[in-house]
Image: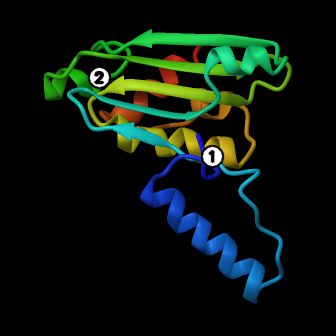
């Protein structure tokens, strides 16, 4: 894509913060280490952050791909909302267990992707989401199931 990346309002806001900090601050910020999420507001929503499985493999990462369908067992909130269509998918770097990318096709995917993005920014292993005590019933509770095999 031309122009240095995705043309999202949230990316433009961060571009401004980088520019402001480099002109008026200590100049330590750049676009090179940011994760820009995207959400397609369909029904169900489609959200993504980070690398796709294909891109991670092409870059030479040794990966593990995790997938779980949206069911009442994996995401109990799905039963309460009646929105049980979708899937959670993550691409994990095997050696560090860090999340390289995540795609969510589910109700509230746009809200859920921020949780994964925060873990990626903090460079924490996916096991942190696997072991987190997440509010019940919520859509993000599905991350316990997604990362259960790590």
Image point (37%, 41%), residue name: 110
Q: Of marks 1 and 2, which one's residue comes earlier in the chain?
A: 1
Q: Is residue 28 left or right of residue 81?
A: right
- Of the numbered discs in the image, which one, if any, rests on residue 76? 2
Local packing at callout 1 (Cα closer than 10 Å; few below 14, some 14-19, many 20+) is: some
Query: Compared to 72, does 118 lie above or below?
Result: below
Local packing at callout 2 (Cα closer than 10 Å; few below 14, some 14-19, many 20+) is: some
- Secondary structure beneath disc 2? helix
Closer to viewer: mark 1 or mark 2: 1
Image point (34%, 22%), residue name: 75
- Of the numbered discs in the image, which one, if any, rests on residue 99? none
Pinpoint residue 63: horizontal percent, then vertical percent: 75, 13
Observer-nearest of 123 and 104: 104
In this view of the protein, can residue 135 be seen by the observer? Answer: no
Q: Is residue 85 left or right of residue 120?
A: left
- Of the numbered discs in the image, which one, if any, rests on residue 35? 1
Image point (51%, 18%), residue name: 89
Pinpoint residue 129: horizontal percent, then vertical percent: 58, 33
Quarter of the C terminus within the rendering:
top right
Observer-nearest of 45 and 127: 45
| Quarter holding residue 26 | bottom right
């Amino acid at each position: 894509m031309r122009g240095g990346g995705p043309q999202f309002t949230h990316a433009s806001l961060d571009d401004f913060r980088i520019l402001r900090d480099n002109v008026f601050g200590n100049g330590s910020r750049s676009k090179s280490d940011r994760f820009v999420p995207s959400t397609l507001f369909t029904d169900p929503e489609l959200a993504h952050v980070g690398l796709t499985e294909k891109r991670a493999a092409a870059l030479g990462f040794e990966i593990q791909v995790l997938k779980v369908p949206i069911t009442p067992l994996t995401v109990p909130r799905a039963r309460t909302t009646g929105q049980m269509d979708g899937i959670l998918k993550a691409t994990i770097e095997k050696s560090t267990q860090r999340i390289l990318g995540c795609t969510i096709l589910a109700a509230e995917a746009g809200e859920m992707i921020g949780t994964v993005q925060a873990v990626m920014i903090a460079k924490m292993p996916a096991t942190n989401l696997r072991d987190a005590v997440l509010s019940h019933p919520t859509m993000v509770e599905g991350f316990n199931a997604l990362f259960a095999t790590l």
